[in-house]
Structures are given as C-alpha cells and as structure tokens.
Amino acid sequence: MKCPIGTTAKTGETCPESGVWEVVGYPTTTAPIAKGNTMPPYSGKAVTWKLIQYA
C-alpha cells in the first residue's frame, strides 16, 4: 500500500515511498528519492521532506 501524497520524512529517516519529494520550508527543492534510501540533508542541513508525486 502506498503512502499518501503529503507524507513527510526527516533527514536521516528511511524513505517510506519512491517518488518526488519536496523540502518543507525555504529555500526549497525537489528530488527523486527511492523507497528504502536514507532521506538526505539539503544545503547541509537536516530538513523535512514531503512526498508530492509518486515515482
């Protein structure tokens, strides 16, 4: 079962769903991240990522 769009995960956590993830806050970016990978930092900082699109 897929995680719903809008699911969040923090830097260092295991990605719960493959798809396009967006950084919550500013500055923001998007990145494709595969399920099972570690959620990355952005600009050298720990951030919260939000799932915006399925892979």
Image (cartoon, rainbow, N blue to C red):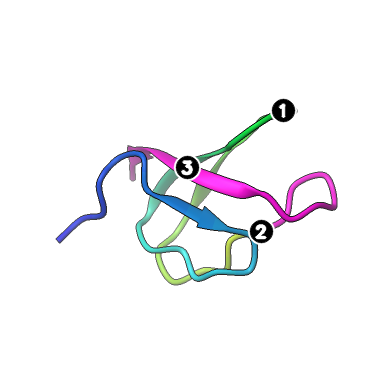
In this rendering, the label closer to the viewer, 2 or 1 = 1
Q: Amino acid at mark 3?
A: Lys
Q: Amino acid at mark 1?
A: Tyr
Q: Amino acid at mark 2?
A: Pro
Q: Which residue is mark 2?
A: 40
Q: Earlier in the sequence, mark 3 or mark 2?
A: 2
Q: Residue at x 80, y 52 (%)?
A: 45
Q: Which residue is situated farthest in the right direction here?
A: 44
Q: Earlier in the sequence, mark 1 or mark 3?
A: 1
Q: Is residue 52 left or right of residue 25?
A: left
Q: Quadrant of residue 38?
A: bottom right
Q: Which residue is mark 1?
A: 26
Magenta highlight range: 41-55
- Residue 21: x %, y % from top left: 49, 42
Q: Which mark is residue 50?
A: 3
Q: Earlier in the sequence, mark 2 or mark 1?
A: 1
Asked if the residue at tag 2 contacts the one at tag 3, i.e. Cβ–Cβ closer than 8 Å, the answer is: no
Q: Residues within 10 Å of mark 2 (few under 14, many from 20)?
A: many
As drawn, 27 above or below 24: above
Q: Residues within 10 Å of mark 3 (few under 14, many from 20)?
A: some
Mark 3, secondary structure of its residue: strand
Counting the numbered discs, the total is: 3
Mark 1, secondary structure of its residue: loop
Residue 18 among magenta residues: no
